[in-house]
Amino acid sequence: MIQQQTILKVSDNSGAKTVKCIKVLGGYKKKFAKLGNVIVVSIQKLRNKSKSTSKVNKGDVCKALVLRTKKPFNIKDGSNIIFQENSVCLINKQNKLIGTRIIGPLPKILKKGKFNKFTSISSGFI
């Protein structure tokens, strides 16, 4: 579960390395974000090699889609999935990716929502 002030890794090639959650979108007084939710983030660190070619700058505020969380979640067949880190990918105001690829696996839950484009770009599913 992601809440305000949570530091997250960025798992796309937009140029950002870490971000901080500012606000969880999706309802009045919503405190936690789960897999597939959209949050507002501020960029904290950039990747060293891509500072000149980065699509974002340090301190920018943008939206992000939650891809992986440390909190385990249940699947209908009765199994649990737990990831090692909290991770997001950056999106723009039209809910399109800022980067061109997603690094690491995605949960199959994201196939069903309005983010089908993300599943076709990613490397694999869990």
Image: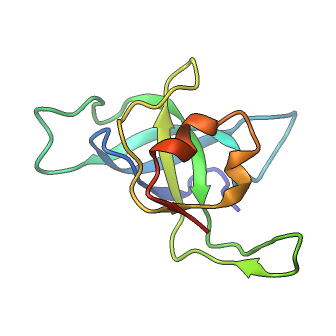
Choose between 28 and 67: the one closer to the eye.
67
Q: In this view, does 21 lie above or below 68?
A: above
Quadrant assignment, res 70: bottom right
Frontmost residue, 118 versus 55: 118
Q: How many marks?
A: 0
Residue 6 on image: x %, y % = 56, 57
Residue 36 visible (yes or no): no
Q: How is the image coloured?
A: rainbow
| Residue 68 location (% of width, % of height) | 58, 61
* Residue in the picture at 50% in, 24% down: 92
> Could you tell me which quadrant the C terminus lies in?
bottom right
| Observer-nearest of 35 and 19 | 35
State which quadrant residue 13 falls in: top left
Rendering quarter of residue 51 = top left
Is 126 left, or right, of 60 in this rendering?
A: right
| Residue under the image location 41 percent in, 53 percent down | 11
Instruction: List the single residue furthest toward the bottom.
Output: 79
Image location (x, y in percent) of residue 34: 73, 55
What is the residue that sits farthest to the top in this orientation?
94
Q: In this view, does 42 lie above or below 102?
A: above
Q: Residue at x 62, y 65 (%)?
A: 69
Q: Which residue is drawn at 58% across and 74% down?
A: 83
Q: Is the N terminus in the top left, top right, bottom left or bottom right quadrant? A: bottom right
Residue 40 at least partly seen:
yes
Report whether 91 appears left or right of 10: right
